[in-house]
């Protein structure tokens, strides 16, 4: 029962993230505006929604510990990026933006190295 709840929450959040991304692109194309949302909130929403969705799906997926760590790292990176979008532009937000970049590099390097090692074993 709890798995179904997590599955539906993650599904709903992922769909909302896709809709928010589409709205962001439509707004950028000048085809529509969302005056009730600030630019920072419109940019942060898809990141925060998809990061949260990915965290909620982890108990459903039940990945092995190493995969869970990678998945939590990726979700946390999206959440941190979303929070950085909401911050005023200052030294702290720039530093946190650099942390986001470093976390994405760590995550992708981890996946790349793991794939190369896996290929060598097979």
Image: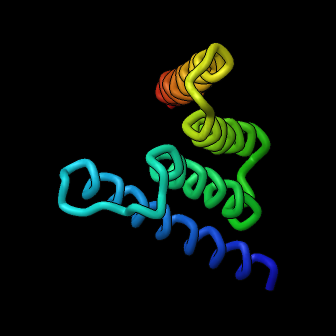
Task: Examine the rendered structure and indicate whether residue 92 appears above or below residue 40.
Answer: above
- Seen from the viewer's position, the closer of residues 98 and 59 is 98
Which residue is found at the position 26% from the left and 48% from the top? 28
Place of residue 6 in the rendered image (x, y in percent of width and height, measured from the top left):
72, 73
Q: Going 50% across and 31% down the picture, which residue do you hit?
A: 122
**Can you give x and y, in whole percent of width and height, for residue 66 in the image?**
74, 37
Q: Is residue 75 left or right of residue 112?
A: right
Residue located at (40% from left, 61% from top): 35
Quick one: 14 or 47, which is closer to the camera?
Answer: 47
Residue 12 seen in render: yes
Q: Is residue 66 left or right of residue 112?
A: right
Residue 36's spot in the image, x, y percent? 47, 64
Snapshot quadrant of residue 50? bottom right
Can you say whether 3 is above or below 83 in the image? below
Q: How many marks?
A: 0
Which image quarter is the N terminus in?
bottom right
Left or right, 29 with reference to 118: left
Residue furthest out toward the bottom = 1
Q: Position of residue 82 (x, y in %)?
A: 58, 42
Q: Residue at x 58, y 58 (%)?
A: 49
Note whether residue 121 is visible: no
Q: Nearer the viewer, residue 103 or 45?
A: 45
| Colouring scheme, one of rainbow, by chain, secondary structure, one colour | rainbow
């Amino acid at each position: 029962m709890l798995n179904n709840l997590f599955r539906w929450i993650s599904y709903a959040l992922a769909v909302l993230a896709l809709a928010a991304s589409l709205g962001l692109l439509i707004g950028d194309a000048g085809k529509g505006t969302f005056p009730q949302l600030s630019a920072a909130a419109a940019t942060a929403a898809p990141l925060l929604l998809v990061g949260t969705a990915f965290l909620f799906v982890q108990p459903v997926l039940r990945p092995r510990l190493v995969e869970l760590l990678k998945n939590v790292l990726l979700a946390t990176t999206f959440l941190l990026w979303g929070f950085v979008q909401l911050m005023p532009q200052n030294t702290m937000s720039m530093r946190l933006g650099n942390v986001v970049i470093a976390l994405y590099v760590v995550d992708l390097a981890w996946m790349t190295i793991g794939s190369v090692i896996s290929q060598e074993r097979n």
